[in-house]
Image: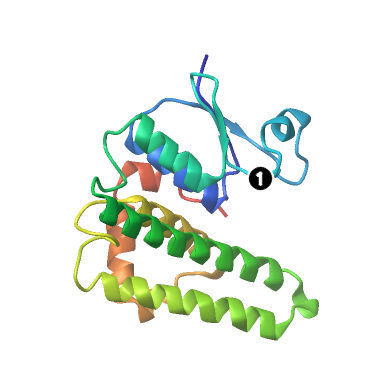
Amino acid sequence: MARILYFAQRSPYARKVRIVLNEKQLTYEPKETDINNKPPEFLSLSPIGKVPVLVDENGLVFWDSTLIVEYLDETYPQPSFYPGSRIERLYCRQGEELADSLIDNVVGLWYETRKGNQADFDTQAKYQSSINRILGVFEQKLTTSAYLLNETLSAVDVAAISGLGYYSLRFGHNWQQKYPKLRQWFEVLHQRQSVYSTMPKA
């Protein structure tokens, strides 16, 4: 059977999986899913009703972007997005969780902003404060290495570029003035076909 990925074009969570699939040169059938009008076929695969969902060639079904990335890396190990040693792998998962937290906060800020006059300023400020804190951590990391874990592209970078791509889509690129190392990293990663081709469209 064909490998299938259920996704939404702007979803930063789905973008993580799309980047990894492209980097590993794994072919798949993309099924764009209307997350506001979810078809029964999709809901039968994803009990939480969220993208992405991967149906692999062997019939295995996985949802949750982080779990999918880990599954792909263990099943199709080249190129690898997690280090080999146990401690480095734990640090990678920790960094990936931080990048996922960035995504969660950006999405939360966007949904709160969409409320217009009904938006709660304190809630917006809370989300923005979390975003700034995480970007500061990543900026500091890039003063000592080319990527967010070590000197090679990892799951941390994949999650972070997906989060920053969505942040840029919704709120523009002003963040680049405050975080020059992140700006350079962002530009370098977008030279990769896997990253450039999955950019969210306005």
Near-viewer residue (187 or 38): 38
Q: Amino acid at mark 1?
A: Lys
Left or right of 18? Residue 105 is right
Residue 155 screen position, x and y as percent = 36, 51
Question: Considering the numbered disc 1 on the image, is that residue within a helix, a strand or a loop?
Answer: loop
Task: Name which quarter of the figure residue 76 lies in.
Answer: top left
Q: Is residue 178 visible?
A: yes
Residue 193 screen position, x and y as percent = 33, 42
Residue 183 screen position, x and y as percent = 33, 69
User: Which residue is found at the position 42% from the left and 42% from the top?
Assistant: 70
Left or right of 198? Residue 92 is left
User: Which residue is found at the position 19% from the left and 71% from the top?
Assistant: 144
Residue topped by disc 1: 50
Q: Quadrant of the C terminus?
A: bottom right
The number of numbered discs placed on residues in the rendered structure image is 1
User: Which residue is found at the position 52% from the left and 14% from the top?
Assistant: 1
Task: Name which quarter of the figure residue 71 lies in.
Answer: top left
Left or right of 74? Residue 66 is right
User: Which residue is found at the position 71% from the left and 43% from the top?
Assistant: 49
Left or right of 40? Residue 7 is left
Q: Please tell me whether residue 63 is drawn above or below residue 86 in the rendered image.
A: above
Q: Residues within 10 Å of mark 1 (few under 14, many from 20)?
A: many
Residue 156 screen position, x and y as percent = 36, 56
Q: Please tell me whether residue 108 is drawn above or below residue 63 in the rendered image.
A: below
Q: Is residue 5 visible?
A: no
Q: How is the image coloured?
A: rainbow
Near-viewer residue (171 or 158): 158
